[in-house]
C-alpha cells in the first residue's frame, strides 16, 4: 500500500514539474519572413502587456514546415497564404479549429531608393544587364507568386532573358530584401509593403492590375504539439486584435481583402493553389 502511495506521489510530482517547466518556457513562434518586421513589434508589445516571453524564428514557409515536422516543437505558426496553412493542416501540425486570418499583402516590384535603373514595370526586368532576385519559388510563397506573374505576363523570349538576369534565389523574404538593401541587386520581385520596412532605401513599383494573379492572405494558427496552448491562444488573440492590427497597418499590411483589391485596382483571388511549378529554376 505504501509502495502504491509512493508511486502515485512520484507520478503527481512529475506531472507538476512538467507543467511548471512548460509554463516557464517562452512561446515559440514560427513566422514566415514576409511578416518579420511587424512580428518583432507584436512580440515586444505582447511581452510588455502580458509578461509572457516569446521567441520567434523566421524563414521561408517550406523550411519552417520542415522544422516543425522534424522537431515536433513550437506553439504558433504565421504564414503569408491560406495555401501554405492548408499544407500545414494536411501534415497534421495545426491544432484543429485554431486558424485565423491576419493580414493581406500584394506582390509588387521593389527597387533601390531613387530607382536608379529607371524601372517602370515588369517587362523592364528582362532588360539586359539588370541584377534581379526572386525568392526561391520552391520554399517561399513570394517566389511562387513572382513566378506565376512572370509566366502569365511575359513572352517566352522575355522570360528567358529575365532568367538570365536572376543572380540569386534567396531562401526567405528577409534575405530577398537584404539583397536590395545591400546593393547586390537592382530590383526584386517582392511585396507592396517593403518600402514601409525600409522607407529610406526602397521604393515600390505597382504591377498592372492584370499582372497580379492573386494576393497573399496571412494566417495564424496554434500548433498541435504546443505545450502552452492557453498562452499560444492568448498570443494569437493579441495578433488579430485591434491593437495587433494597428501594428501591421504601420507596415502597410492590408486588414481586409477589399483594401488590397483597392490598392491593386481590381478584385483578385485570395491565396489559392500552389501557383509555381516546383522545377521552375531548372527550366
Image (cartoon, helix red, strand yellow):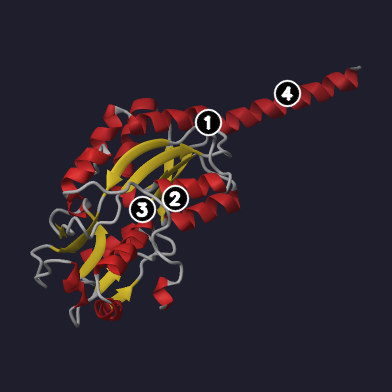
Tell us which disc is closer to us: 1 or 2.
2
Residue 201 at what x, y percent from top left?
15, 60
Which residue is disc 4 drawn over? 12
Q: Earlier in the sequence, mark 3 or mark 4?
A: 4
The local secondary structure at tag 1 comes to helix
Q: Which mark is residue 33?
A: 3
Q: Earlier in the sequence, mark 4 or mark 2?
A: 4
Cα distance, mark 4 to mark 1? 21 Å
Q: Quadrant of the C terminus?
A: bottom left
Q: Residue furthest right?
A: 1
The local secondary structure at tag 2 comes to helix
243 versus 259 height, above or below: above
Q: Which mark is residue 209?
A: none
Viewer-proximal residue among 273 and 77: 273
Q: Earlier in the sequence, mark 2 or mark 3?
A: 3
Q: Which mark is residue 229?
A: 1
208 versus 157 height, above or below: above
Amino acid at each position: 500500500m505504501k509502495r502504491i502511495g509512493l508511486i502515485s506521489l512520484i507520478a503527481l510530482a512529475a506531472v507538476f514539474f512538467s507543467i511548471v517547466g512548460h509554463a516557464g518556457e517562452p512561446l515559440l513562434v514560427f513566422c514566415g519572413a514576409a511578416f518579420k518586421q511587424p512580428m518583432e513589434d507584436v512580440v515586444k508589445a505582447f511581452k510588455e502587456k502580458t509578461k509572457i516571453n516569446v521567441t520567434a524564428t523566421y524563414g521561408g514557409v517550406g523550411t519552417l514546415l520542415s522544422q516543425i515536422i522534424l522537431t515536433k516543437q513550437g506553439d504558433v505558426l504565421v504564414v503569408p497564404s491560406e495555401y501554405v496553412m492548408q499544407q500545414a493542416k494536411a501534415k497534421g501540425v495545426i491544432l484543429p479549429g485554431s486558424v485565423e486570418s491576419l493580414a493581406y499583402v500584394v506582390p509588387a516590384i521593389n527597387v533601390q531608393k531613387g530607382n536608379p535603373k529607371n524601372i517602370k514595370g515588369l517587362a523592364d526586368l528582362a532588360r539586359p544587364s539588370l541584377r534581379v532576385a526572386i525568392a526561391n519559388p520552391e520554399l517561399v510563397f513570394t517566389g511562387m507568386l513572382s513566378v506565376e506573374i512572370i509566366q502569365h505576363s511575359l513572352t517566352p523570349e522575355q522570360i528567358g532573358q529575365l532568367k538570365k538576369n536572376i543572380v540569386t534565389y534567396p531562401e526567405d523574404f528577409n534575405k530577398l530584401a537584404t539583397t536590395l538593401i545591400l546593393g547586390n541587386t537592382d530590383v526584386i520581385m517582392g511585396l507592396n509593403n517593403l518600402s514601409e520596412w525600409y522607407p529610406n532605401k526602397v521604393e515600390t513599383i505597382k504591377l498592372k492590375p492584370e499582372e497580379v494573379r492573386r494576393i497573399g492572405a496571412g494566417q495564424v494558427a496554434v500548433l498541435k504539439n504546443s505545450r502552452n496552448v492557453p498562452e499560444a491562444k492568448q498570443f494569437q488573440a493579441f495578433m488579430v486584435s485591434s491593437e495587433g492590427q494597428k501594428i501591421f497597418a504601420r507596415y502597410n499590411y492590408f486588414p481586409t481583402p477589399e483594401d488590397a483589391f483597392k490598392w491593386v485596382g481590381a478584385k483578385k483571388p485570395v491565396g489559392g493553389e500552389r501557383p509555381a511549378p516546383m522545377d521552375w529554376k531548372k527550366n
